[in-house]
Image: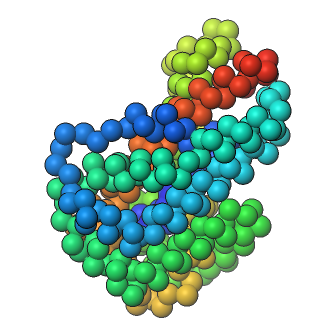
């Protein structure tokens, strides 16, 4: 599945929407804090096989590429920090090996003692490989705003009475893509501000934790609208070359016990990694702004 997106759909990129611009980067030290708990873990060889079949290494490359390109967003935000410093920080923070290790550990913890055999069987099948590749290529394409608009327009113009439109609705509902992405985005926002304050960045006078939380959650309708648009646009573009029968088979897999466990594990691992990422990026942003006497956020 993706991660808005990220990714659900079971490719790592279909169910998870990209978490917005300036606030998300991968901080190596923060990710190292995320250890595997004491609960039962899946067989390491099987977990590696599953993640390889789902093209997780390629997914991580896409996420790191997206992160490295965020320096322009920081500069446009006008925080008073020179672009080369943002470039340096993002290049250092988006470490493919660290990110891949973090996802592997989080997936192992989230899957616990689940039977990975049916998950591997699906993703090693011709259909599973086709879907994983389609989701990956669509995620790459939708890094471009023009491609996002094309995808969003394609969904908007799709007749809601068609079989394809119903399949997309089923896919989103079965994998709870909108709700899970909204919750993840909100939690990442909270973690980002926690990182800022922990690094000594001062909030506006008189603002307490509850005020900050209220301000973040006040943006929920806008976040939900953005997430919904991205998820439906992505689903329209990514699966357009699947036949209706192939798409339905993918949705049916999502309904199985194995599919539901994998979907939960994907969201759990992405949320855990991005919460660490957001908290670390908040702290890193505060440090740079203090060093360069940047403006208040």
* x and y, in percent, of residue 42 in the image: 21, 57
Q: Which of 177 and 222 is in front in this view?
A: 177
Q: Which of 219 and 26 is in front in this view?
A: 26
Q: In this view, does 191 lie to the left or right of 223?
A: left
Q: Position of residue 204 (x, y in %)?
A: 68, 14
Residue 275 visible from this viewpoint: no
Q: In this view, does 209 lie above or below 165?
A: above
Q: Residue at x 79, y 17 (%)?
A: 293
Tell me the quadrant of the picture where the C terminus can be found: top right
Residue 23, x across and y down, in percent: 63, 39
Identity of the residue drawn at 72% across and 18% down: 290
Q: Which colour scheme appears in the figure?
A: rainbow
In the image, residue 182 sits, relative to residue 192, either above or below, namely: below
Residue 232 occupies quadrant:
bottom right
* Res 134 seen here: yes
The N terminus sits in image quarter: bottom left
In the image, taking residue 152 as reference, residue 79 lies left or right, namely: right
The x and y percentages for residue 147 are: 72, 70
Residue positioned 18% across, 44% down in the render: 39
- Residue beneath the point at 72% across and 51% down: 69
248 shown above or below 91: below
Q: Nearer the viewer, residue 111 or 263?
A: 111
Instruction: Report whether 279 appears left or right of 11.
Output: right
């Amino acid at each position: 599945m993706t991660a808005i997106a990220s990714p659900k759909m079971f490719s790592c990129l279909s169910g998870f929407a990209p978490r917005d611009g300036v606030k998300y980067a991968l901080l190596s030290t923060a990710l190292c804090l995320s250890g595997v708990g004491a609960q039962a873990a899946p067989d390491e060889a099987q977990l590696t096989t599953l993640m390889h079949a789902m093209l997780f290494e390629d997914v991580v490359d896409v996420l790191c590429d997206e992160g490295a390109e965020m320096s322009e967003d920081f500069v446009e935000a006008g925080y008073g920090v020179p672009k080369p410093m943002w470039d340096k920080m993002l290049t250092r923070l988006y470490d493919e090996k660290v990110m891949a290790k973090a996802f592997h550990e989080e997936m192992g913890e989230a899957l616990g003692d689940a039977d990975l055999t049916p998950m591997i069987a699906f993703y090693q099948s011709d259909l599973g490989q086709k879907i994983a590749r389609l989701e990956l290529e669509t995620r790459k394409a939708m890094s471009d705003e023009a491609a996002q608009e094309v995808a969003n327009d394609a969904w908007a113009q799709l007749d809601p009475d068609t079989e394809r439109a119903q399949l997309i609705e089923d896919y989103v509902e079965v994998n709870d893509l909108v709700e899970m992405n909204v919750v993840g985005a909100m939690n990442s926002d909270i973690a980002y501000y926690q990182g800022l304050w922990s690094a000594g960045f001062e909030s506006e006078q008189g603002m307490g934790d509850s005020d900050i939380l209220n301000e973040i959650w006040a943006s929920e309708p806008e976040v939900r609208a953005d997430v919904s648009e991205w998820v439906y646009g992505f689903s329209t573009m990514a699966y357009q070359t699947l036949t209706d029968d192939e798409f339905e088979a993918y949705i049916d897999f999502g309904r199985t016990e194995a599919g539901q466990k994998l979907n939960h594990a994907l969201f759990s691992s992405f949320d855990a990694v991005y919460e660490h990422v957001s908290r670390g990026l908040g702290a890193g942003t505060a440090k740079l702004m203090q060093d360069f006497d940047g403006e208040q956020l």
